[in-house]
Amino acid sequence: MAGKFITLEGGEGTGKSTQAPRLAAHLEGAGHTVCITREPGGAPGAEAIRELLVTGDPGRWDAAAETLLHYAARRSHLTETIRPALARGEWVVCDRFADSTLAYQGYVGGVDKGFISEIHARVAGDLTPDLTLILDLPPEVGLARAQARGEGEDRYERMGLDFHQRLRAAFLEIAAKEPERCMVVDADGDIETVAARIKKAVEDRLEV
Ligand code: TMP
């Protein structure tokens, strides 16, 4: 049976990284072999680029250069991890993918969306996620979560509420433009509640 490609998207602190392994476990329980992966990263060369992107001074690149770095990482990730897994018939659960570039670098960072879509076509060709779950959360709730955890709080606050609001609006616009591929999932709630919403969304859209 052919594998499926599921991406999880959303702003900072929306719980993607907590939910991705839960979704993977659910799919494994349904009998699928699952490749769980993330961006930036998911292959050795791509993880090295991630290291560059997420540590150190964020002002080293402008948003267009950042776009190119994300696409360099994505190319390795697609070639070494995602395409081979799909070819083996596995289900791929990916924590962030191309919509993150469109939202962060395009909508919020101001990079021309035509430029992003041209690079995307070159790198990803016609590979599109079968389903994209956009985890949606009011930024105030994300901030409260970050504060409760006592970690990542600085990073969250440093970006500013306006940034988080623009990001949220960007993801919602992406979802509205591609309703067949995207589903918005309310990420406000405890881990189990959100996991149940994700499970239902996947079962509504795909034959699990
Ligand atoms: P993470 O914290 O969800 O692992 O993501 C790392 C950061 O990279 C996060 O702030 C979002 C950002 N990012 C982009 O700006 N563009 C992209 O294309 C991707 C995949 C992530």
Image (tube, helix red, strand yellow):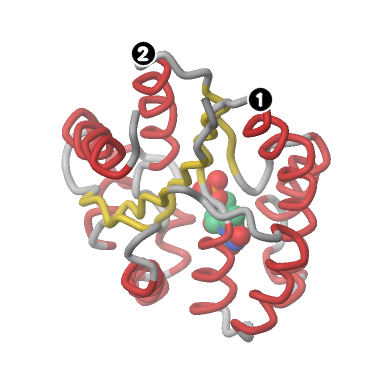
Q: Residue at x 73, y 60 (%)?
A: 71
Q: CA distance from mark 2 to mark 1?
A: 18 Å
Can residue 70 be seen by looking at this rendering? no
Can residue 45 be seen by looking at this rendering? yes
Is 144 drawn above or below residue 6 in the view shown? below
Q: Nearer the viewer, residue 195 or 207?
A: 207
Query: Which of pointers 2 and 1 lies earlier in the amino acid sequence?
Result: 2
Is 159 drawn above or below residue 38 in the view shown? below
Numbered marks: total = 2
Q: Residue at x 52, y 30 (%)?
A: 91
- 2 vs 1, front mark: 1
Disc 2 target residue:
29
Disc 1 target residue:
88
Q: Residue at x 37, y 29 (%)?
A: 23
Q: Position of residue 35 (x, y in %)?
A: 57, 26
Tag 2 near tag 1, CB within 8 Å: no
Displayed quadrant of residue 84: top right
Tell me which amino acid carries mark 1.
Answer: Arg
**Element assignment for label 2:** helix
Q: Position of residue 123 (x, y in %)?
A: 75, 60
Displayed quadrant of residue 150: top left
